Amino acid sequence: MDIKEQSQRDAVLKEAREWLKTPYRHEGRIKGYRGGVDCGQILACIFENAGMRPKITTTSYPMQWALHQHEELYIKELKKYAREITEDEVLPADIVIYKVAHTFSHGAIVMEPWPGKILHSVNGLGVIYSDASREGFLKQVTKRAGAIPCRFFSAW
């Protein structure tokens, strides 16, 4: 990894930490306890605020869209800004997308070497750190059989 990439990754991780404790708000894009953000918009905001991307605009989406369709809209949108990588290639500041219901529809920033801590926005909890292999619906995420499917993306 070159110096420029490491500097960019550090900026993404620093920005991600600044979103901690922001409440969950569907389609929200405002950092802080008076703001709100969901698991998709937080990814856009982090990469925008870290200087990695210009403003990312998305169309409006229902809160529970993943429960009612099979088209991979989240992945389709993400591929405009990041490339898919293998689990073995994941580094801090990369993105993990979990399959929820019918589609890959819950995003998080990898904060530590995989499968360590991630940062994501969770309905009812807001922006939190989670252990990618031991907490909540994430506890089965690893290469083990029966694991919750996930995919990985990198902006580099």
Image (tube, rainbow, N blue to C red):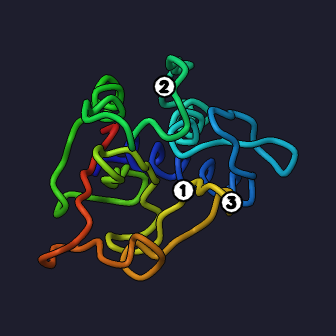
Q: 124 or 135: nearer the eye?
A: 124
Q: Can you name the residue that lies furthest to the bottom here? A: 134
Q: Residue at x 47, y 75 (%)?
A: 136
Q: CA distance from mark 1 to mark 3?
A: 12 Å
For residue 84, above or below residue 122: above
Question: Of discs 2 and 3, which sits in the foreground?
Answer: 3
Amino acid type assigned to the residue bearing label 3 in the image? Gly
Answer above or below: position of 103 versus 118: above
Kind of residue at disc 2? Arg
Which kind of residue does numbered mark 1 sit on?
His
Mark before the other along the chain sequence, 1 or 2: 2
Marker disc for residue 120: 1
Seen from the viewer's position, the closer of residues 43 and 123 is 123
Residue name at image x 16 percent, y 73 percent:
143
Q: Position of residue 38 (x, y in %)?
A: 60, 43
Q: At x 39% / y 43%, what residue is drawn?
A: 67
N-terminal label among 2 and 3: 2
Check disc 3 and report the residue beneath it.
124
Instruction: Report whether 32 appears left or right of 104.
Output: right
Q: CA distance from mark 1 to mark 2?
A: 19 Å
Mark 1 or 2: the one toward you: 1
Horizontal and vertical percent position of residue 89:
19, 58
C-alpha separation, residue under disc 2 versus residue under disc 3: 28 Å
Mark 2 — residue?
A: 53
Query: Of the residues tagged 1 and 3, which is closer to the observer?
Result: 3
Q: Position of residue 106 (x, y in %)?
A: 42, 49
- Confirm or deny contact between disc 2 and disc 3 (CB under 8 A): no
Residue at 28 percent across and 46 percent down: it is 102
Q: In front here: 123 or 31? A: 123
Mark 1 residue element? strand
Left or right: residue 70 compared with residue 48: left
Q: Residue 58: x percent and y percent?
A: 50, 20
